[in-house]
Image (cartoon, helix red, strand yellow):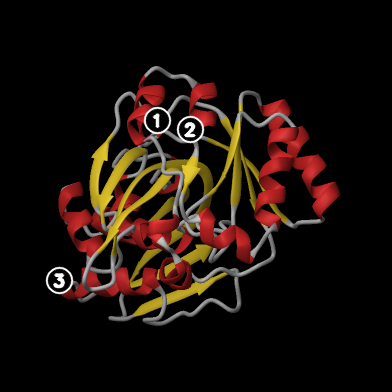
Amino acid sequence: MKTIKLKARAKINLTLDVIGKRENGYHDLKMIMQTVGLHDNITLTRIAEDEIRLSSNMSWMPTDERNLAWRAAHLIKQTYGITEGISIDIHKRIPVAAGLAGGSADCAAVLVGMNHLFSLHLPRTKLEELALTMGTDIPYCVRRGTVLAEGLGNELTTIAPPCPFCYVVLVKPPVSVSTAKVYQSLQLDKITEHPDTTAMLCAIKNGNLHTMGQLLCNVLETVTIPMHPTIAALKSHLCAHGAIGALMSGSGPTVFGLFATQESAHAAAHALKKEFHIKDVFVTHIYHTSHSNVGKEKKNDRYEI
C-alpha cells in the first residue's frame, strides 16, 4: 500500500464541566464528547525521500513542526525508525480555532493512517498513548464516538450504547477565541450551573434525545458568551427554529443544535444564514464508530477514520 485516505472528524461536547484546578494551573474536567460527520480529508502517501511533506487547501496553514499533523508523522517516524518519507495532504473543512478539535482530529488521522500505511500493527491503546504526548484531546480523536472524558480530558470511557442518531447544525461565528484565555478567566466559585453528567449518561443510554437536549451544559459558556454575546443569540435562534437543544462546543465559539430530522436541520441552517450572514454553517449528524471501517480495504485504498 502506497497511499491511504482518511476522514478526520470533528467533535462536539454534549457536556463540559470543570471540576477543579490543579497546582500546575491545569483544570480537571468531566465531559461527554461526541464525534460528528463533518470531517477533513487526509491523504497520506509513502515517498522514497526521508522527509515529511505537508500540503493543504488552506494557504495559511503551517507545513512544518508547528502543525500537529506534521508532528504526528515525525513522532511515528522517530519512534519506529521509519526511513521512508511521508507526504500529507490536508483538505480542511472543519473550521479552525472553533472548539471542534479540527487540528487534533488531523493529528489523530495521521497516527492511525501511518499505523496502517507502514504495517506497524499498533493497538489503539498505544496510538492513544502516543497521541497524549501531543495534546490532551488527541487520544479522544483517535478513539472517537460517544466518550466520557475525565482528568485533563484524557481519561476516556467509551459509552455504550452510544448517543442516539440525530442531525446536528454547526455554526461558527466569525470571531476568535483563545482556549487558554477562557480557562484562565474561568471563576469556578462563581459557576452556579454544572452539567448533570449522570443524568446525561442515562438519557444517552435510553436514547432520549429530548432529555439530552434539556441537559446540554458547558460551564465555559460563562466566560465565552460575555466575550461574544452572538453565541447566546445563535443558541436562541437554533432553539426557536426547532433544535431539541443547543450549546457551545468546547471553549467556543462554535454553537451546535441537535435536530430530529434532516429537513428541520436544513431549515434552521437556512434561516440562520439569512439572519446572521455567517459563512461557516454546516448540517451534519452524529457519527458512531460502528460506522467505521478502519483496517478494511475499500475502493481506491480509502479508509474510514
**SS at badge 1:** helix
- Give the residue at mark 1: 200
Mark 2 → mark 1, Cα distance in angstroms: 6 Å
| Position of residue 44 in the picture relative to residue 243 (left or right) | left
Q: Which residue is mark 2?
A: 215
Tell me the kind of residue under disc 1.
Met
Front disc: 1 or 3: 1
Disc 3 element: helix
| Residue in view at x 40 percent, y 80 percent | 66
Which corner quadrant holds the N terminus? Answer: bottom left
Image spot of residue 179 (x, y percent): 46, 67
Q: Residue at x 40, y 31 (%)?
A: 291
Q: Quadrant of residue 213?
A: top right
Q: Which residue is mark 3?
A: 79
Report how far apart the C-alphas of labels 2 and 3 lie in the structure.
Answer: 43 Å
CA neighbours of label 3 inside 10 A, class few (<14), some (14 to 19), many (20+): few
Above or below: residue 93 compared with residue 198: below
Secondary structure at badge 2 equals helix
